[in-house]
Image (spheres, helix red, strand yellow):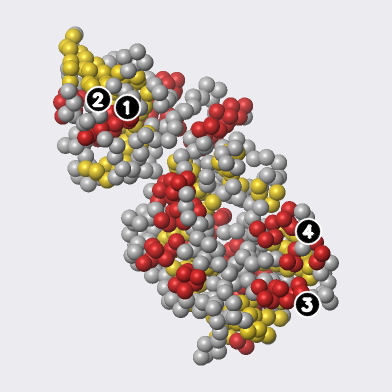
Amino acid sequence: MIGSGAAEPTQLVDALVRDGEHLADNEIVHLLTLGPAPYVRPEFSARFRHAAFFIGPNVRGAVQEGRADFIPVFLSELPRLIESRRVPIDVALLQVSPPDAHGYVSLGVSVDIVRAAVAAARLVIAEVNPRMPRTHGDSFLPVADIDWLVAVDCPVLELPFAAPDAVSAAIGEHVAGLVPDGATLQTGIGEIPNAVLQALGNKHDLGMHTEMLSDAVIDLVQSGVLTGKRKTLLPGKVVTSFVMGTRRLYDWVDDNPAVEMRPSDFTNDPMVIARNDRMVAVNSALAVDLTGQVAADTLNGAFFSGIGGQVDFVRGAARSKGGKSVIALRSTARSGQVSRIQATFGPGAGVVTSRGDVRYVVTEYGIADLWGKSVRERSVILMELAHPEHRRELMTEAKLRKYVFQDQRQSVVTPDVVRPEVLLLKDGVAVHIRNLRTSDERALQDLFYRLSDDSVYQRFLCHKVRHSREEIAMLADFTDAANGALVATGNQESEELLGVARYDRDSVTNYADFAVVVRDDWHGRGIGSALFERLGRMALARGVRGFTADVLVTNGRMLAMLNRSGHQLNSELAAGVQHFEIRLDSSDPSLEPQPPLASRPAEP
């Protein structure tokens, strides 16, 4: 077995290939390694056969061409697999730090499955590198446990920091909205994990329990965001099994008692993970189908990576008190040509995480909470996370498979003109305002059934006792050109709608009829005024000249809201109904675009 990640002993690997003419039929196993893998070259096939626990770029071609093998296994179970000799390790090749005064070396940046390999191996050979960080936790090894020491002095392998682009940054913002203060995090390495960590700058007392650690963690620690004070397991400690990044990261973990290195059967054990309250696990995927299945180790029918720790953390977070598991991915691949949200997976695709395990799915277009959702509901909400250019095809496929109603409508709304906002009510309660989505049909129906008879009459100007799915589907159907709608929810994850505002534009006059309704038990708290203000902002941005509305003279709340709005109102009274025309003025400061996710006080 070859040491993992950045701790790959590259000089031992080079010597193994260069001076191994006498070797035959040796099997080489390891997790992802950052350095070269010359042993998988075709000319060495008689000497070496590689079996990958996780497929990295350096061995991917060999696996896909059948010159190397893939062992699917949960990372949490790998140490036991080695210790039981189901996968027998005869020789362990490592890289360690120099011995300390007590005769102990440190396994440095990779403890993961290396400790189990050292315990199981009949022969342990280690590069001793003064540039290898001396890490704390379960990383120390007596020199006496090593059979041969090879002195080297070379840079530890580095993984450049992947700076997030605009798409990754949008995903990071969405995921950050799911992270409460005091949460304990698990993230991976790459653009999206880096974007998530960078988006957490306004959080407090976060913790870290993860299988891998990257550069992005340093800034959170140094800014005082990631303190670990509220962790319920190993408080104050950043817990990880391996570290992979730049020299800046290696210098930071060197002799840092706040970083706790542990083997994979600890960091990835779902029962251990669940001991962290408010555990938020963020994992990536190659594709998600409309039922919620996650493909993470295959691409185009070929093995691409591995199971790794995704399922471990998905299940551990699900069992954590207040925990959440998140699958985060871009909506497309191949420069937008391929949708990562798919109706169904193609031949050869592997499901790493089952549809029953998946909770949150996030793309740059938003968040889908799949817990407790039917296949029909999942299909609709996941299509909203797909790129708009792929949604029509997905809907066609969903109808063919009877996943959705045959008359299911589909939103063609492009990314929000009005970004989600947090509204602080007078009593300090936070309300979230966002665009109405097609997947809100059931919640919108529930809102109308919760209204009092008076509120129903004032909203629809008639008595109604039934709100059919067909009617609700029409109200939840909108396009950028013709109409728009906003909803208020109790929190970003809430399934309950507290209020809704909608406008429908007349293409001739370029005025739009609007309506606002708020649940009776939330009246008088500023929600209606907030929805109306933001609806006006949305309409103005889309070129609407003004609003019209017919309001019953008995609807005192709506009349008061309009009078407080500050707009110039033109009205006519006829048969107990006040007809309003409201011109939207771009010079009105209340209609200027607002920053996303801004906490702003509610109007009186």
Amino acid bearing label 1: Ala
CB atoms at circles 1 and 2 under 8 Å apart? yes
Amino acid bearing label 3: Asp
Q: Closer to the camera: disc 3 or disc 1? A: 3
According to the picture, the residue beneath numbered tag 3 turns out to be 19
User: Residue 77 is drawn in which quadrant?
Assistant: bottom right
x and y percentages locating residue 282 in the rendered image: 49, 54
Left or right relative to 552: residue 406: right
Amino acid bearing label 2: Leu
Q: Which badge, 3 or 1, comes first in the chain's sequence?
A: 3
Measure the C-alpha gap from mark 2 to mark 4: 68 Å
Q: Residue at x 55, y 45 (%)?
A: 356
Circle number at residue 584? 2
Q: Closer to the camera: disc 2 or disc 4? A: 2
Q: Quadrant of the C terminus?
A: top left
User: Residue 463 is drawn in which quadrant?
Assistant: top left
Q: Which badge, 4 or 1, comes first in the chain's sequence?
A: 4
CB atoms at circles 4 and 1 under 8 Å apart? no
Q: Which badge, 3 or 2, comes first in the chain's sequence?
A: 3
Q: Which badge, 1 or 2, comes first in the chain's sequence?
A: 1
Measure the C-alpha gap from mark 3 to mark 2: 79 Å
Q: Closer to the camera: disc 3 or disc 4? A: 3
Measure the C-alpha gap from mark 3 to mark 1: 73 Å
Q: Which badge, 2 or 4, comes first in the chain's sequence?
A: 4
Q: Is residue 423 visible?
A: yes
Residue in front for this viewpoint, 426 or 30:
30
Q: Label 3 neighbourhood size at 10 Å, few (<14), some (14-19), many (20+)?
A: few
